[in-house]
Image (cartoon, helix red, strand yellow):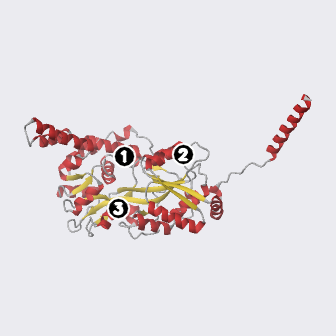
Amino acid sequence: MKKLIFFSVILIMAGAMLFAAGKPEAKKVDYLSLSWDQLTAEAKKEGSVTFYTWLGEDFFKSASQKFKEKYGIDVNVIIGDRTANQNKVLAEKDKEVGTIDAMHVGGGDMVKATIAAGAYYGPILPVIPHAGKLDPKLSKVQEGIATNGFLAPGWRNQTGLLFDPERVSDPPQTWEQLVAWIKANPKQFAFCDPSKGGSGQAFVQTAIGYLCGGLDKYQGDTELVPDKINNWDVAWKWFNDIENMVTITGSNNESVSRLNEGEVSLVVAWDDNVLQHLKKGTLFKRAKLYIPSLGLPGGGDTYGVLKNAPNKAAGILWVAFLTDSDTQVMMNDIMGSTIARTDVKGKNDLLTEDERQKNGVIWIPGPYKAKFIADFVQNVLMKEGLYGSIVTAVRAPGEGETDRIFFALILQNYLISGLTAGAVKC
């Protein structure tokens, strides 16, 4: 009896093994090799896409409704925290199937960390029919990080020089002309503390490029190479030499506000920030923005599909839809951000496509940017002489111990809050 049972078990196991061997294995679809019509059909089968971002709720909600109308595919738009979104992607990167299909990718550490982790599916750009009409710079590099076709440009932003045409009749174009203009017009040129805003970072990067041997040597680096920054002291000396000729503000907004109030005549500013001020009426309408031939950096944000996305086809289709001409125009109208395509002009554009491509430059990699921000604060803003003048100023009102303690607390508040540069140097 035992032998019979044992033999029966063996037969059952053998049959199960034969059945498993004969069962066809589920075939994984290579979405990157499909025609666009085939990929669209697969996306419709998947039926939904989950998209993560941290801003632009009105735009993405409107876009998701139009996407649903066109393809019958639901879009679950998750408006989260930027850092939390990044951490979620990194936490799920080794899972066979994650919970995110597509995401909005910002610059800085976000693009660096997620690209380094191999978090994205693709490259997707060669699959998108209109990829050739997307910004060629942002299609290749974001914040100095090579994206290799895994991320599609979503929108752009660009720094430029903003001026009052009633006070500046011949705005400078070259580096030499800008330096001469600064010297001829003391305190009329403004840029913000680079630790407080990207427009300030743009000017510091530009100065490093002209004073320290160009910017090309930094491109492609994922980590800081010490030998490449050993002459940055030349830049810090230049900034210290012109300290009394320029105005350093406390933020991107403050630079624009000071121009509007007539305190300065020429400032470094973001195109989208200028547009916001114009819409709110906090900047006079005669103000002009341009990218000088000396070049100023710009970039933008992108979209990517996760490598473990449960709905890859729908994710690719959604990214393509977000970069479609009609959707881009809607984005420009709702968000005010610059269209990522080179063949479509938004009604809110302040810069021409020609000057963007000709005079706009890409950011150097994040590690170098972080380094020059810290070095600028230490070597330019935190000079001993500058702090000495602050201490003298706050002690001047009174000789009593109470007065000294009170004003010392004011000084401490400035130092901790990072407002020293704005309070003293602006």
Q: Could you give the CA–CA distance between mark 1 and mark 2, rounded to whole angstroms? A: 23 Å
Residue receiving disc 3: 271
In terms of secondary structure, where does tag 3 sit?
helix
In terms of secondary structure, where does tag 2 sit?
loop
Residue receiving disc 1: 369
In terms of secondary structure, where does tag 1 sit?
helix
* Residue 157: percent from left, percent from top: 39, 59
Q: Indicate which label's residue lies in the foreground, 1 or 2.
A: 2
Q: Residue furthest left?
A: 399
Residue receiving disc 2: 118
* Residue 125: percent from left, percent from top: 55, 57
Tell me which amino acid carries mark 1. Answer: Lys
Is 141 or 26 nearer to us in this picture? Answer: 26
Q: Could you give the CA–CA distance between mark 2 and mark 3, rounded to whole angstroms? A: 32 Å
Tell me which amino acid carries mark 3. Answer: Asp
Q: Indicate which label's residue lies in the foreground, 1 or 3.
A: 3
Residue depicted at x 28% and y 56%: 175
